[in-house]
Amino acid sequence: PLPSFPHIHMFPPFAFSHSAILSCQALRLGIALLEGGNAQTQESFFQFFKGGDTTRFFKRIQDKMANSKLDMKNDEDSMSDKLASENSCMQAILRFLQLLCENHNSKLQNYLRFQSNNKTSFNLVLQTIKYIDYGIAMAINDQNVPNVIQVGHRCSIPFALPLAFPPSFFSPSSLSSLFLMFHVLGAANLTEYCQGPCVANQDTVASHESTG
């Protein structure tokens, strides 16, 4: 079994390096260490977050979500290399946040919503909802209803979804279907954010007004 992350303090600068490859690899390392509900690693991350001002770390996550939405808008008619890279990075971010909260980790569920020790707090629960909402709104149109239905039928195991589709499904002509699938994956985060239950996170989800 993997040990708990021995160098938590190194994670944020590497995870959000200017190198997209390094960023994604660092996030995947965090994912591997958290996989399966590793409570010791969850606690290590929580203690790191609480141990100083990690405003920059959380701001970068929020900025990544915002920038990814802009990339979706700018590239909605073609599968550009930049968009593919952003999707890969966003999938890693969402999976990392999900695993932080796995097994009803109430401390991290609440911390992702409100970082009391930081100069500025970023509500990543709300940002995740907005990100998912935006992607689904972009994905659904009159031409792709069959693909929307197909995605919906295959979403019972959200993070296994990529295995359920052939590579041809993600061609430029079906880019909106990729948006929808990817944001259905993000919906798994909301489950982990709210289970327990975490009433404050449930209230955040319930009070959000969809823009779709």
Image (tube, helix red, strand yellow):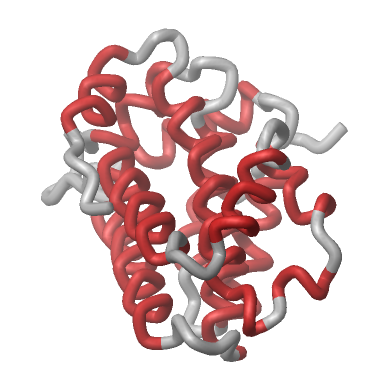
Say whether residue 23 is visible.
yes
Answer yes or no: is residue 51 visible. no
Q: Quadrant of residue 3?
A: top right
Q: What's the residue at 85%, 65% (across, down)?
A: 166
Residue in the picture at 61% in, 79% down: 84
**Is residue 143 positioned above or below 46 on the image?**
below
Between 45 and 179, the residue placed more toward the observer is: 179
Residue 12 picture location, percent across and down? 46, 60
* Above-or-below relation of 170 to 91: below
- State left or right for residue 136 relative to residue 112: right
When the figure is inspected, residue 75 is found, relative to residue 89, above or below; the finding is below
Q: Residue at x 12, y 49 (%)?
A: 119
* Residue 44 shown left or right of residue 62 in the figure: right
Q: Give the percent coordinates (x, y) of residue 180.
A: 53, 57
Tell which of 118 and 174 is nearer to you: 174
Given the current orientation, which residue lies at the most extreme front position?
142
Looking at the rendering, in which quadrant would you find the N terminus? top right
Place of residue 118 in the rendered image (x, y in percent of width and height, measured from the top left):
18, 45
Counting every numbered tag in the picture gives: 0
Q: Residue at x 66, y 46 (%)?
A: 31
Picture quarter containing residue 155? top right
| Left/right of residue 203 with respect to residue 152 in the rendered view | left
Q: Percent x, y for residue 168? A: 81, 75
Q: Quadrant of residue 62?
A: bottom left
Please tell me which residue lies in front, 157 or 49.
157
Nearer to the camera, 24 or 132? 132
Relative side of 205 to 101, left or right: left
